[in-house]
Amino acid sequence: MIASALVAYLAKRGADYGVHTEPVTVDMVKVRERKRNMVTAFRSSDEHRIESTKGVDLLMAEARFTGPKTVEVRLHNGETRQLRANMIFLNVGARPAVPSLSGLEQVNALNSTTIMELATVPEHLLIIGGGYVGLEFGQMFRRFGSQVTIVEMSGHLLTHEDDDVADEVAKILREDGIEVLLQTNTIRVEQPAADTILLTVHGPDGERTLRGSHVLIATGRVPNSDWLNLEAAGVETDSRGFIKVNERLETNVPGVYALGDVKGGPAFTHISYDDFRIIRTNLLEGGPATTRDRFVPYTIFIDPQLGRVGMSEAEARTQGRNIRVAKMPMNYVARALEVDETRGFMKAVVDADTSQILGCAILGIEGGEIMSVIQVAMMGSVPYTVLREGTFAHPTLAESLNNLFSSFVE
């Protein structure tokens, strides 16, 4: 869907490139169909692979513990089965959180799942939450033609990022015509008509009422552990319901493991994949894999992308590290100039004593790909000087690393 939004954005900008297009319209049903077809293809491929694996049974069902190492499975046809095993793996994920908000139960609110099933472009989309879900959907629907307002209670979007990164993201979204309200609390929501949402908020300028056609709740996710009757198995969770695990992903009950979002921590598909690799390495290959010190890269798929890995500047300073910070605007990057996508900047944090790269934030065209190049260097303990002096093909985005690591601001 983000790819469809990018096409709409570039089509509208055609004249900037000397290409004149007809008025751009968006067929939301076609966008949705493309998304559904891709999901179906991925899902059916996975299901076929599982079903064709000798010794594996795939049950479409709901499961809950009835005792230690015992699971009751309620099949979709109504049949119930009891299963026992010495080893059980819990990978049940998480779901969108529902905040305590006055009036929400009477409103037809969207979440990160249901918003992808819209058949029409919202006239005015109100978004509660300034995290990556809210920003990705906000920019997407702005490019499809919606008015968009993002309401965030803190002083910055993306609260885990450095302030300069978050501020630049807000600047980019505002340039795109998105209204970004910071330090703004949502008080209540109402739906006086099918096509009208009223959102009462309180910000630096006092209380006001926002009027929209749709509202997206993007205030985080909660684990699906509450469906599992974990008490019957003695499996412990934290105060928010995330399953507690050690660095080998084993719960407090020997032989019961948790993977993916349900165990808390970074909620990314690639982290769930890596959780599998840890389990496979330890239980099938007799290896010593753990979650200790693993890199947690991620990309926020706004445009330009924000690719992040390792320490932020704030984290490094909190730890008392002796650091140097390299920073360079994307309009210094030849490739970005050539394709006329120069918004954002590149930033890297380096250990001043060892020349090792501690982390980076790449807010720019294909920021996730540039970040991955730096991550590979970090994985190999390659000092920043090697990237600074490296020979990269011209004109590519990778060659910008020469200049980035020559652009220390402190």
Image (tube, rainbow, N blue to C red):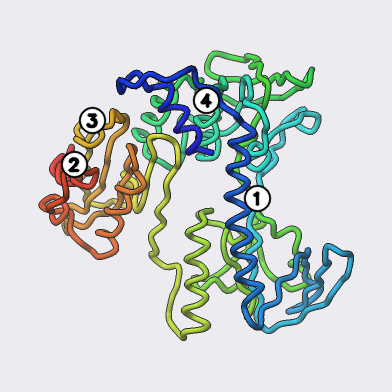
Residue 175 image label: none
Is the N terminus in the top left, top right, bottom left or bottom right quadrant?
top right
Residue at horizontal 31%, vertical 29%? 343
Q: In this figure, which residue is indicated by the disc labeled 2?
A: 395
Residue at horizontal 15%, vertical 42%? 403
Is residue 344 positioned above or below 272 on the image?
A: above
Please state the horizontal and vertical placement of residue 397, each as a whole percent of the image.
24, 43
Label 2 – label 4 distance at C-alpha? 31 Å
Which amino acid is tagged 1?
Val
Label 1 – label 4 distance at C-alpha? 27 Å
Residue at horizontal 30%, vertical 23%? 17
Please state the horizontal and vertical placement of residue 215, each as a whole percent of the image.
66, 28
- Mark 3 and mark 2 lie on one chain; the one further toward the N terminus is 3
Q: In this figure, which residue is indicated by the disc labeled 4?
A: 142
- Mark 2 and mark 4 lie on one chain; the one further toward the N terminus is 4
- Mark 1 and mark 4 lie on one chain; the one further toward the N terminus is 4
- Mark 1 and mark 3 lie on one chain; the one further toward the N terminus is 1
- Of labels 1 and 2, the one closer to you: 2
The crowd level at tag 3 (other Cα within 10 Å; few <14, some 14-19, many 20+) is few
Q: Find out whether the residues at labels 2 and 4 contact each other: C-beta distance under 8 Å.
A: no
Query: Dot 3 lies on which element?
Result: helix
Query: Residue 333 sits in which quadrant?
Result: top left
Which amino acid is tagged 2?
Pro
Residue 222 image label: 1
